[in-house]
Image (tube, rainbow, N blue to C red):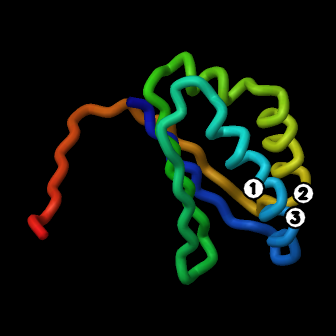
Amino acid sequence: MHVIVFRNRLKPDALAEYTDWAERMSALARTMPGYVSHKGFTAADGERVTIVEFATEEGLRAWATHPEHVAAKQHGRAGFYAEYSLQVCTEQRVSRFTAAS
């Protein structure tokens, strides 16, 4: 499993444009081979975090180099991100718990 942690802050006036692009990229990501899931969160201080999971490195690479995603990344740097960081991680260990109903 490959996990991407994408942390970012938007420019003050960029939320509407970001939301449009994020919705398109979300739909596209779901069509990629090896895609598992993604979820986004926004902290009280405005930092946004998206966690993306891909089952394979090949799927992750296909997503990173998909022409529409490449264009979105370029547009984001030019238009609506004030800053971001990206971490690509490989699963080392998994532990799960579900409480009995």
Q: Position of residue 80 (x, y in %)?
A: 84, 61
The reply to whether callout 2 and callout 3 are in contact (CB within 8 Å) is yes
Q: Is residue 58 left or right of residue 100?
A: right
Pointer 3 local density, CA inside 10 Å: few below 14, some 14–19, many at least 20: few
Residue plotted at (75% across, 67% down): 10
Q: Quadrant of residue 9?
A: bottom right
Pointer 1 local density, CA inside 10 Å: few below 14, some 14–19, many at least 20: few
89 relative to 52, above or below: above
Read off the residue under disc 2.
79
Q: Compute the Cα span from label 2 to label 1.
A: 16 Å
Residue plotted at (48% across, 37% down): 36
68 relative to 59, above or below: below
Residue 45 or 71: which is nearer the viewer?
71
User: Foreground mark, 3 or 1?
Assistant: 1
Q: Which mark is residue 69?
A: none
Q: Compute the Cα span from label 2 to label 3.
A: 9 Å
The amino acid type of the residue labelled 1 equals Glu
85 relative to 48, above or below: above
Q: Position of residue 14 (x, y in %)?
A: 85, 69
Q: Which mark is residue 17?
A: 3
User: Foreground mark, 2 or 1?
Assistant: 1
Q: The N terminus appears in which quarter of the rendering?
A: top left
Read off the residue under disc 1.
23
Q: Compute the Cα span from label 3 to label 1.
A: 10 Å
Q: Position of residue 61 (x, y in %)?
A: 61, 22
Pointer 2 local density, CA inside 10 Å: few below 14, some 14–19, many at least 20: some
